[in-house]
Amino acid sequence: MEADPVTPPRADVVRLLPSHVSSENPMHLVQILLPTADNDGLPFLTERFETLRSELTDRFGGVTVFAQGPAEGFWKGDDGTDRDQIVIFEVMAEEVDGGWWSALRERLEREFRQDEIVIRVQVILRL
Protein backbone atom coordinates (compact mmCIF):
# COMPACT_ATOMS: atom_id res chain seq x y z
CA MET A 1 0.00 0.00 0.00
CA GLU A 2 1.41 3.34 -1.07
CA ALA A 3 1.68 6.24 1.38
CA ASP A 4 -0.24 9.40 0.67
CA PRO A 5 1.93 12.14 -0.83
CA VAL A 6 2.79 14.91 1.61
CA THR A 7 1.15 18.21 0.74
CA PRO A 8 3.69 21.02 0.88
CA PRO A 9 2.82 23.83 3.29
CA ARG A 10 1.23 26.97 1.90
CA ALA A 11 3.68 29.81 1.47
CA ASP A 12 1.67 32.14 3.72
CA VAL A 13 1.34 29.61 6.56
CA VAL A 14 4.50 29.18 8.58
CA ARG A 15 5.71 27.31 11.61
CA LEU A 16 8.24 29.50 13.40
CA LEU A 17 9.76 26.91 15.74
CA PRO A 18 13.56 27.21 15.71
CA SER A 19 15.38 24.13 14.44
CA HIS A 20 17.19 23.63 17.76
CA VAL A 21 13.92 23.28 19.69
CA SER A 22 12.20 19.93 19.53
CA SER A 23 8.66 19.48 20.70
CA GLU A 24 5.67 17.52 19.57
CA ASN A 25 3.36 20.43 20.38
CA PRO A 26 4.99 23.72 19.39
CA MET A 27 2.58 26.63 19.48
CA HIS A 28 2.58 30.26 18.48
CA LEU A 29 1.37 33.00 20.79
CA VAL A 30 -0.11 35.83 18.73
CA GLN A 31 -0.67 39.16 20.44
CA ILE A 32 -2.68 42.12 19.16
CA LEU A 33 -1.99 45.48 20.81
CA LEU A 34 -4.99 47.82 20.52
CA PRO A 35 -5.47 51.37 21.76
CA THR A 36 -8.36 52.00 24.15
CA ALA A 37 -9.06 55.47 22.71
CA ASP A 38 -8.74 57.34 19.43
CA ASN A 39 -6.15 60.04 18.73
CA ASP A 40 -8.44 62.67 20.31
CA GLY A 41 -8.67 60.66 23.55
CA LEU A 42 -12.25 59.45 23.01
CA PRO A 43 -12.66 55.83 24.21
CA PHE A 44 -13.59 53.23 21.62
CA LEU A 45 -16.95 51.54 22.10
CA THR A 46 -16.86 48.26 24.03
CA GLU A 47 -18.66 46.56 21.13
CA ARG A 48 -15.57 47.02 18.94
CA PHE A 49 -13.50 44.91 21.36
CA GLU A 50 -16.30 42.38 21.91
CA THR A 51 -16.57 41.80 18.16
CA LEU A 52 -12.86 41.03 17.91
CA ARG A 53 -13.02 38.79 20.99
CA SER A 54 -15.86 36.77 19.43
CA GLU A 55 -14.10 36.53 16.08
CA LEU A 56 -10.86 35.25 17.64
CA THR A 57 -12.73 32.81 19.91
CA ASP A 58 -14.63 31.39 16.94
CA ARG A 59 -11.47 30.97 14.84
CA PHE A 60 -9.00 29.77 17.50
CA GLY A 61 -11.23 28.25 20.18
CA GLY A 62 -10.32 30.87 22.77
CA VAL A 63 -8.72 34.22 23.45
CA THR A 64 -7.20 35.98 26.44
CA VAL A 65 -7.85 39.71 26.78
CA PHE A 66 -5.74 41.84 29.10
CA ALA A 67 -8.00 44.84 29.63
CA GLN A 68 -8.39 45.48 33.37
CA GLY A 69 -5.37 47.72 33.81
CA PRO A 70 -4.48 48.89 30.34
CA ALA A 71 -0.81 48.80 29.52
CA GLU A 72 0.81 51.93 28.14
CA GLY A 73 2.71 52.20 24.88
CA PHE A 74 5.21 55.00 24.27
CA TRP A 75 6.91 56.02 21.03
CA LYS A 76 8.73 58.97 19.53
CA GLY A 77 6.41 61.20 17.54
CA ASP A 78 6.89 64.42 15.60
CA ASP A 79 6.18 66.53 18.69
CA GLY A 80 8.00 64.43 21.31
CA THR A 81 6.91 61.25 23.01
CA ASP A 82 3.40 59.97 22.29
CA ARG A 83 1.45 57.59 24.50
CA ASP A 84 -1.48 55.17 24.21
CA GLN A 85 -3.27 53.04 26.73
CA ILE A 86 -3.67 49.61 25.18
CA VAL A 87 -5.39 46.29 25.66
CA ILE A 88 -3.77 43.06 24.54
CA PHE A 89 -5.57 40.16 22.86
CA GLU A 90 -3.74 36.81 22.83
CA VAL A 91 -4.43 33.57 21.01
CA MET A 92 -2.45 30.35 20.67
CA ALA A 93 -2.21 28.69 17.28
CA GLU A 94 -0.28 25.76 15.86
CA GLU A 95 0.35 27.64 12.60
CA VAL A 96 0.44 31.29 11.63
CA ASP A 97 -1.54 32.20 8.52
CA GLY A 98 0.28 35.37 7.47
CA GLY A 99 -2.34 36.38 4.92
CA TRP A 100 -5.18 36.16 7.43
CA TRP A 101 -3.27 38.09 10.11
CA SER A 102 -2.21 40.79 7.63
CA ALA A 103 -5.80 41.27 6.51
CA LEU A 104 -6.94 41.48 10.14
CA ARG A 105 -4.24 44.05 10.93
CA GLU A 106 -5.25 46.19 7.95
CA ARG A 107 -8.91 46.00 8.97
CA LEU A 108 -8.13 46.94 12.58
CA GLU A 109 -6.00 49.88 11.42
CA ARG A 110 -9.02 51.20 9.50
CA GLU A 111 -11.55 50.50 12.27
CA PHE A 112 -9.38 52.01 15.02
CA ARG A 113 -8.10 54.81 12.74
CA GLN A 114 -4.45 54.01 13.47
CA ASP A 115 -1.32 54.34 11.34
CA GLU A 116 -0.19 50.99 12.68
CA ILE A 117 -1.62 48.20 14.81
CA VAL A 118 1.00 45.84 16.20
CA ILE A 119 0.36 42.13 15.84
CA ARG A 120 3.29 40.04 17.00
CA VAL A 121 3.97 36.34 17.27
CA GLN A 122 6.19 34.28 19.56
CA VAL A 123 7.03 30.61 19.48
CA ILE A 124 6.00 28.93 22.72
CA LEU A 125 6.06 25.42 24.12
CA ARG A 126 3.09 24.14 26.07
CA LEU A 127 4.38 22.28 29.08
Image (spheres, rainbow, N blue to C red):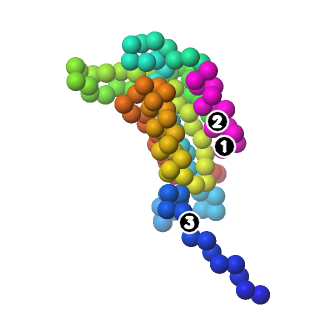
Assess whether residue 57 is covered by the magenta stretch: yes
Assess whether mark 1 and mark 2 are in contact (beta carbons under 8 angstroms). yes
Residue on which disc 1 sits: 59
Residues 102 and 118: in front is 102
Q: Quadrant of the N terminus?
A: bottom right
Q: Which disc, if any, is residue 9? A: 3
Q: Are marks 3 and 2 in contact (CB under 8 Å)?
A: no
Residue at which label 2 appears: 55
> Badge 2: few (under 14), some or many (20 or more) residues near its Cα, within 10 Å?
some
Drawn side of residue 27 relative to residue 4, left or right = left
Residue at 64 percent of width and 62 percent of height: 24
Q: Specify the amino acid type for callout 1.
A: Arg
Pick whichever, 73 or 9, lies toward us: 9
Residue 10: image location, x then y, percent: 54, 63
**Label located before the other in sequence (3 or 1):** 3
Give the x, y percent position of residue 85: 44, 21
Identity of the residue furthest to the bottom in this view: 1
Q: Is residue 13 above or below residue 119?
A: below
Q: Earlier in the sequence, mark 3 or mark 2?
A: 3
Q: Secondary structure at mark 2?
A: helix
> What residue do we see at 70% from left, 78% from top?
4
Residue 78, compared with residue 54, is above or below; it is: above
Report the amino acid beneath label 2: Glu
Q: Mark 3: which secondary structure?
A: loop
Cα separation between marks 3 and 2: 25 Å
Whether residue 82 appears in this view of the structure is yes
Magenta region, residue range: 47-61
Quarter of the figure with residue 59: top right
